[in-house]
Image (tube, helix red, strand yellow):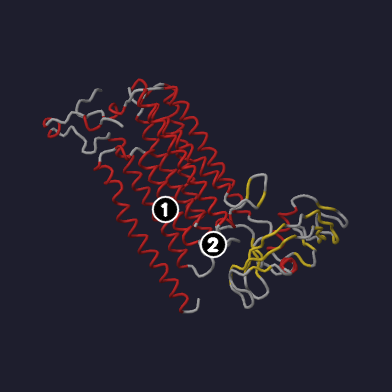
């Protein structure tokens, strides 16, 4: 595209040390070197993830089972949201190339327009990632359960809606007969995790006991993820699955049901899975965030006209290189975390 | 201060409107291609489950498509395809050597650890 190689190349300049062996400016070269090292970091992280996955003894989570929610629409849309995120990031990479191209024509207005579009795309992506993390941390409505034979299973189906709690035994805050309608799912999950649900009676924070009114779960299927005495990994249990599920959550034993994810346990699979998820997507998200900040700073200087006075828009090119790199890393994260 | 000891390579990259039209056409073409690849990937992932016999094939096509996407981003969007050959290889060779090696050695090791754990009945 450019005419790098036509730059004066007589013996005086060559031997005088005036020529870059790469025919590129110092700043761009240093950005490339930084990206080479940063890519090795991400490469190391992803390969460590691969090692752990291959060494792991229990079933590794499947992307389309873990990530199947859409904002406002709930569950049942495997990978659609992350596909949208990927698309947004690719498009913001495209707008960045267009900004660089406009810069080569000294078209200040064009650079402004496309850089602004890039920044908006980047913000969208960071916001989507925050949503994705929120969902990952809070988890599904059903959670992962431990069956009577010691096997562990994730649950698919339609979760029966919780209508209310009716207090049957007064505690510090609630009097007998009170009907609680707020924050139901959260309290329900919390109680089950701590073994405080028995015979559909929940023990609340203040010590009061309440009867849970919940609709029946429908189309329940248990997918076994860890072997037990009776069920083996990969098995689908649908006959009487709603009864088994009901029994488990009403067992009154703590830690038989896990909801969402933290650094110690998660409902999706082995502990390391969530640890790698948090670390790698977090590290990438931090890169995206910094990229948005860099782009914004450069954008301000474009608006101010600094690069126009300088005679070239190379700074846009450099921050562009970084931005494309962020997109590049995501392409790999997308494949190895969500697809395979 | 004006410096005369360095060549301003950044000034060489300017082009006119006619070239710009061509370049933009190329950019939009690559955009369409990357979008189609992403759609194909998600469709494959949604319709072919990991329990399917086709899964091995699908898995490797995911990896191949990822490399195609990566190549387009690096060579076209990051303009590495337009840089001098020396620069291109200084940047790409470390990956062809070290990352490929690291993938090979750690996946092999991972499988060996898994087999060892199984052998002692973990």
Between A193 and A206, the one nearer to me in the picture: A193
Residue lying at the far right of the rendered structure = A177
Which residue does the numbered mark 2 point to in the structure image? B50
Image position of A228 with respect to A24: above or below = below
**Horizontal side of residue A6 vs A337, given as left or right:** left
The answer to which of marks 2 and 1 sits earlier in the sequence is 2
Read off the chain for label 2. B
Quarter of the figure with residue A167? bottom right
> Among all residues in the image, which is located at the extreme front?
B54
| Quadrant (top left/top right/bottom left/bottom right) for the N terminus of chain B | top left
Which residue is depicted at the point 44% across and 31% down?
A: A297
Q: Position of residue B120 (x, y in %)?
A: 47, 79
Q: Residues within 10 Å of mark 1 (few under 14, many from 20)?
A: few
Q: Residue at x 37, y 33 (%)?
A: A317
Find residue B106 and name its label: none
Observer-nearest of B28 and A257: B28
Find residue B64 and name its label: 1
Q: CA distance from mark 2 to mark 1?
A: 18 Å
């Amino acid at each position: 595209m450019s005419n790098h190689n036509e730059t004066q190349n007589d013996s005086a300049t060559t031997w005088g040390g005036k020529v870059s062996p790469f025919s590129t400016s110092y700043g761009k070269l240093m950005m490339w070197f930084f990206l080479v090292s940063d890519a090795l970091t991400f490469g190391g992280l992803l390969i460590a993830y691969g090692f752990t996955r291959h060494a792991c003894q229990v079933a590794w989570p499947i992307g389309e089972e873990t990530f199947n929610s859409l904002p406002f629409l709930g569950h049942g849309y495997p990978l659609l949201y992350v596909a949208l995120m990927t698309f947004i990031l690719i498009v913001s990479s495209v707008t960045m190339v267009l900004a660089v191209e406009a810069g080569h024509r000294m078209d200040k207005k064009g650079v402004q327009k496309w850089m602004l579009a890039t920044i908006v795309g980047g913000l969208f992506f960071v916001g989507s990632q925050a949503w994705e993390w929120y969902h990952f941390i809070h988890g599904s409505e059903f959670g992962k359960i431990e069956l009577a034979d010691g096997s562990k299973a994730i649950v698919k189906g339609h979760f029966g809606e919780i209508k209310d709690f009716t207090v049957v035994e007064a505690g510090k805050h609630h009097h007998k007969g009170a009907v609680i309608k707020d924050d139901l799912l959260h309290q329900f999950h919390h109680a089950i995790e701590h073994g405080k649900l028995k015979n559909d009676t929940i023990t609340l924070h203040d010590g009061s006991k309440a009867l849970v009114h919940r609709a029946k779960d429908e189309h329940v299927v248990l997918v076994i993820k860890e072997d037990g005495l009776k069920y083996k990994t990969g098995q689908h249990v649908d006959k009487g699955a709603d009864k088994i599920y009901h029994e488990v959550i009403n067992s009154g034993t703590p830690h038989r049901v896990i909801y969402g994810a933290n650094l110690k346990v998660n409902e999706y699979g082995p502990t390391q899975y969530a640890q790698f998820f948090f670390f790698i997507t977090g590290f990438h998200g931090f890169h995206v965030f910094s990229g948005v900040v860099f782009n914004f700073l450069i954008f301000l200087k474009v608006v101010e006209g600094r690069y126009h006075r300088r005679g070239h828009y190379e700074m846009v090119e450099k921050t562009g290189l970084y931005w494309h790199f962020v997109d590049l890393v995501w392409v790999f994260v997308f494949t190895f975390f969500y697809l395979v | 201060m004006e410096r005369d000891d360095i060549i301003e390579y950044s000034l060489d990259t300017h082009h006119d409107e006619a070239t710009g039209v061509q370049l933009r056409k190329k950019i939009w073409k690559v955009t369409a291609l990357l979008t189609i690849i992403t759609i194909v990937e998600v469709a494959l992932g949604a319709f072919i489950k990991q329990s399917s016999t086709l899964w091995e094939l699908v898995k490797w096509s995911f990896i191949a498509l990822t490399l195609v996407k990566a190549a387009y981003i690096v060579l076209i969007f990051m303009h590495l395809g337009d840089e001098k050959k020396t620069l291109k290889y200084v940047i790409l060779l470390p990956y062809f050597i070290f990352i490929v090696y690291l993938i090979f050695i750690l996946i092999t090791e991972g499988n060996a650890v898994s087999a060892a754990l199984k052998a002692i009945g973990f």
